[in-house]
Image (cartoon, helix red, strand yellow):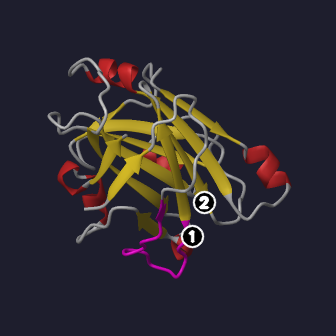
């Protein structure tokens, strides 16, 4: 199990790359772009910036959509189990233009799709237009997650920060179509098929400084 220590930054400044998605265990091709994971937090917000080192291309989805639509684009995924006593995890999949979907559940199957529900706990930013115009060899997504609002949405307990708080997580790089360019990368490696990357008992560990 991998561990990632997330630095405390009251003003949520961008920091150095903490780790990478560079394990492509289940890919059907030789495509395997590195994804730099930048992260920090304050007492209420988790901030993740993912830099995907592959040429930016036009995407097909510009609005929140279901998984089968987002899967038409190259995406990054954040899987987060914020409360260890609750086995549900939160999946956020995002494409280069910032379109996303959200779901909650124990693992990949039988999840509650929450994409179109009120989700004040998530804020996504991207610079898709500028990067596309300049034919950039990378694309970036920033996601800020409000932990008090996320815990309220989950209705499990009230969020209270303390140093060394532990959460569970994984980060993914996914592309499923076209088939010849399919690839699947992960931060915390799993030993079996790709769906195991979503299981709560197969997630890595986040420690909030």
Q: Quadrant of residue 149?
A: top left
Above or below 56: residue 92: above
The region drawn magenta spans 19-34
Q: Is residue 87 left or right of residue 22?
A: left
Label 2 with label 1: CB-CB less than 8 Å:
yes
How far apart are the two marked residues, 2 and 1, measured between alpha carbons? 7 Å
Above or below 104: residue 16: below
Residue positioned 60% across, 59% down in the render:
52
The extreme left residue here reads 85
Q: Is residue 80 left or right of residue 130?
A: left
Q: Tell me the quadrant of the picture where the C terminus can be found.
A: top left
Q: Tell me the quadrant of the picture where the N terminus can be found.
A: bottom left
Q: Is residue 91 visible?
A: yes
SS at circle 2: strand
Going from the N terminus, do you reach mark 2 or mark 1 first?
1
Residue positioned 17% across, 34% down in the render:
86
Return the x and y of residue 75 as percentages of the image width and height: 53, 54
Above or below 14: residue 85: above
Q: Residues within 10 Å of mark 2 (few under 14, many from 20)?
A: many
Q: Quadrant of residue 153?
A: top left
Identify the mark at residue 33; answer none if there is no mark: 1
Residue toward you, 79 or 49: 49
The extreme right residue here reads 134
Above or below 204: residue 97: above
SS at circle 1: loop
Residue 166 falls within the magenta-colored stretch: no
Return the x and y of residue 164 as percentages of the image width and height: 29, 39
Q: Is residue 71 visible?
A: no
Residue positioned 26% across, 41% down in the render:
166
Return the x and y of residue 55 as percentages of the image width and height: 70, 65
Which residue position is annotated with label 2? 52
């Amino acid at each position: 199990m991998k561990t990632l220590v997330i630095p405390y930054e009251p003003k949520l400044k961008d920091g150095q790359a903490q780790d990478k998605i560079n394990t492509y265990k289940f890919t059907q091709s030789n495509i395997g772009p590195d994804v730099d994971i930048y992260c920090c937090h304050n007492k209420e917000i988790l901030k993740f910036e993912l830099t995907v080192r592959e040429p930016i291309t036009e995407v097909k989805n510009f609005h929140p959509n279901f998984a089968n639509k987002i899967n038409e684009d190259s995406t990054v995924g954040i899987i987060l189990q914020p409360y260890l006593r609750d086995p549900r995890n939160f999946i956020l999949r995002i494409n280069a233009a910032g379109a996303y979907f959200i779901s909650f559940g124990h693992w990949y199957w039988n999840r509650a799709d929450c994409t179109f529900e009120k989700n004040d706990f998530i804020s996504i930013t991207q610079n898709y237009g500028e990067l596309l115009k300049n034919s950039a060899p990378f694309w970036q997504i920033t996601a800020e997650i409000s932990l008090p609002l996320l815990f309220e949405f989950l209705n499990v307990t009230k969020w209270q920060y303390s140093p060394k708080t532990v959460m569970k997580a994984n980060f993914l790089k996914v592309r499923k179509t076209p088939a010849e360019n399919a690839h699947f990368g992960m931060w915390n490696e799993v030993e079996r098929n790709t769906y195991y990357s979503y299981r709560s008992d197969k997630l890595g560990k986040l420690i909030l400084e």
